[in-house]
Image (cartoon, grey):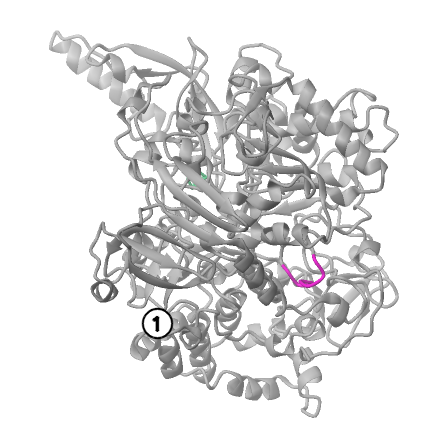
Amino acid sequence: MDLRKLNERVSAARRATEARGETFYPGPSRVHLAAFPPKERWDDWVELDSKAWPARVEKRYMLVPTTCFNCESACGLLAYVDRETLQVRKFEGNPEHPGSRGRNCAKGPATLNQVTDPDRILYPLKRAGQRGEGKWVRVSWDEALDDIASRIRRALSEGRPNEVMYHVGRPGEDGYTERVLAAWGVDGHNTHTNVCSSSGRSGYHFWMGLDRPSPDHANASVILLISSHLESGHYFNPHAQRVIEGKQAGAKLIVFDTRLSNTATHADYWVSPYPGSEAAILLAIANHLIQHRRYDREFVRRWWNWQEYLEREHPGVAPTFEQFEGILRTLYADYTFEFAASESGVDAAVIEEVARVVGSAGTRLSTHSWRSAAAGNLGGWQVSRTLFLLNALLGAVATPGGTSPNAWNKFVPRPIHVPPHPQTWNELTWPREYPLATNELSFLLPHLLKQGRGRLEVYFTRVYNPVWTNPDGFSWIEALADDRLVGLHVALTPTWSETAFFADYVLPMGHGSERHDIHSYEQYDGQWVGFRQPVLRAARERLGEVISDTREVNPGEVWEENEFWIELSWRIDPDGQLGIRRHFESRRTPGAKLTVDEYYGYIFDHSVPGLPERAAAEGISPLQYMRRYGAFEINRRVGPLHEERVPPAELEDVAVDRFGRAYTRAPKPPDPNVVPVGSPDPDADGRRPAGVEVDGVILRGFPTPSGRLEFYSPTLVGWGWREYALPTYIRSHVHRSRLAPDQLVLIPTFRVPMQIHTRSANAKWLDEIAHTNPLWIHPQDARRIGVRTGEPVAVETEIGRFVLKAWVTEGIRPGVVACSHHMGRWKVRDTGQRQMMATVALEQDRGRWGMRRAQGAHAYASSDPDTLRIWWTDVGVHQNLAFPVHPDPVSGQHCWHQAVRVTKAAATDRVGDIVVDTKKAAEVYRSWLATARPADRYSPDGTRRPYWLLRPLRPSKDAYRLPERREPAGVSGD
Ligand code: SF4
């Protein structure tokens, strides 16, 4: 909105009103209501107090940016800090944030509920009874820090680094904690990723050396989503707004989703496949493009590693592109529309029409797959691999409207101190059975501990609730309750969770407006960096106060992890003897403790291109700029980095192998974030990979071993998976041929738009909208079973059963049922979050667990009068408890879909009932483990894992070597 024009309009209105002899009130903001507050007025923004209406009472605010912590999108928020009370009155969007552009979903503004939740944890608590007994005493931060630090110090001093583990759910930051763990010298980083996106990542990783897509939806002519982007998918709001922009500009939207999601309702083509058949459809589309020569020949010739494929798999064939094309035409010839239809249940004519639409996109095909089908199925990693095959065929890679590798649209700055790689390998997170796993085998931890593969002296959970989020939660409880397996469990959490009940310390950490983090995500073809900050700290600093500890401004004694890690690290190594403390010392004042101001100030001063200049233009420091605006756009239109020429200065002593991979002795480029090159192995003479020669010119290429897009994966072949060398279709563990006649498939993976795992449960506005998770069931199945909407049904899994209400809908295929995973929160006592957690009775007898709801949500008196208005009681069922672990043998992803029997509930059943046998859970674990191909049998080179594959916290190269060299078994999975 043009301020000058607005002022003119306001002045004209004033004159007209006063000419009528009336009093003129121009509105408190003097800005059109549809406009964002202009940033020049963020120090003193005026609005009317809605509660005082009809009186016009003006309220003055300071607007302070931060970023939302309620999903991985990290959208910008603006906190409206009341200048009188210095309290946050509301959160709205930050128009200065390049990813979210001022827009948020319902969960962003609901940050206010999380801050004011009367049930939140405000002080450090220490367990007073048995683990899980629910008895706590308040302790000081000093007491907790000293106890935790001494146990870590002892473990490190006694050579037990693998007994220190940090397990994170939503990191919400880039690299801070990896840096902490590297400084401690532990390989103790554990994530939630293998219950989330490992398979989605894996398919991309084998193609391009980077594990995520960055689609340019806004400029696409065809958008193909294997997810529910318009309601809850990955990078939900930033992507959703660009998908809609693309549609407004005429793009066709194709959505693969077995459920009629909100996203599917916006699609031009809604494809509802039988779960697990998505890759069969994608290969039929690929086959159509190949047979009809609709692919981009030049792109395929230049960028696929077809020469390597021919030499290794067709050694007798002349290594020409024409020969490859001939073979390519045979590779997918069996993937006809009819075959895809028979696998998926989708009409062949519909698949054919979709194929034609995809073929019409040319280089403007934006695609995205993340959790969804990839996370549900055995072999789900082939869903993202076959999806990207379509981009690779059409040359729609890093083009306007195409799909880029994520790292080209993401920015990870270099921090102030960079500790060396840890010298150790932790088999509790990276067991040798899964050498190609995309991330840690986090959800197997209880089984690995119970098998005696290790123990934990100190185990941190942070924004993570494995008892509730992971499958097989009762096995988690059994492990967490056993202090021989877990010596000390520290839960770093802003709110109560099922896992925190089994901790020794519960330490209160801040929400999105109470902590520092930086992050950057691939949300369009550009690069930005965002800054999360404690907004009251920033507000009071604007008023001239000096704040040195975020606890000074947060409620109670709520802290933030970053200051906590610095303090803890000093106490682990008080005299610097362990070599840890130096990574947490000030550069400005040697010997003094690093502060978050210096940590982030250093990054913004030294590591973010363009930021110092932009800040200087406003006469402020880069840190002040980020505190004032919350985000900075580094690049817009990054484009095809793989086509960039490698400058001669980076090609000293260059050697090019027969497939074109170029190696050099020149040092790496100064800023690996601008042109990420990954970590493929050096050549035999120790030169590092520098690029790839294409038509006689050395270009940046992709960070794969070949430098090209790897249609053919020598890595998969070399590590025993020859049958998956090319993008292909793997029949899921819930393929119809594997189901008994009376079994259905349960889809348990989908999100609802207003909830996000554990921490949104303490947001009353969200809870009122979405608080239960009925079973979606098709009318045909409902009739057969004899249930109607609202009636209870029992769902039987491999290890137990649960009871929930039915929702009869044609929005799901016959033979498939679905249940959102957000609900079914519980507690065993009334301590805990009360708006969304039922109180349950829990019983256990030698691995036979039973849960029954004693009381649902209910109205209660608290500091917030709204808690007396809670009208809902049903908070859904915790279905994940009844799922055994299903580790995919390649990606390591938990394959979520379940083969189930659904029956009308018995008279003795009650909604919320859960019964599970953890002995059976252990049997299922062992049966899936037996399908793995372990490194000590299949490694081609005596290492635990291909070095070029990404790892969140990479240990030293020595640690990659298996302790004992065994003879490789060869290839083909024999
Ligand atoms: S999409 Fe919603 S929950 Fe996610 S960061 Fe943005 S506002 Fe927050």
Read off the magenta span.
431-437
Identify the residue shown where x is 36% and y is 58%: 795
Q: Position of residue 68 (x, y in %)?
A: 47, 34
Q: Position of residue 923 (x, y in %)?
A: 57, 62
Q: Is residue 184 above or below residue 284?
A: above
Secondary element under disc 1, as helix, strand or loop, is helix
Classify the position of the C terminus by image quarter.
Answer: bottom right
Q: Residues within 10 Å of mark 1 (few under 14, many from 20)?
A: many
In the image: residue 723, left or right of residue 97 = right
* Pick the front one: 779 or 961: 779
Amino acid carrying label 1: it is Val
Tell me if residue 591 can be seen: yes
Q: Position of residue 461 (x, y in %)?
A: 60, 38
- Most foreground residue, 558 or 352: 558
Q: Is residue 801 above or below residue 344?
A: above
Q: Measured along the vertical axis of the image, is residue 678 above or below residue 628? A: below
Frontmost residue, 236 versus 791: 791
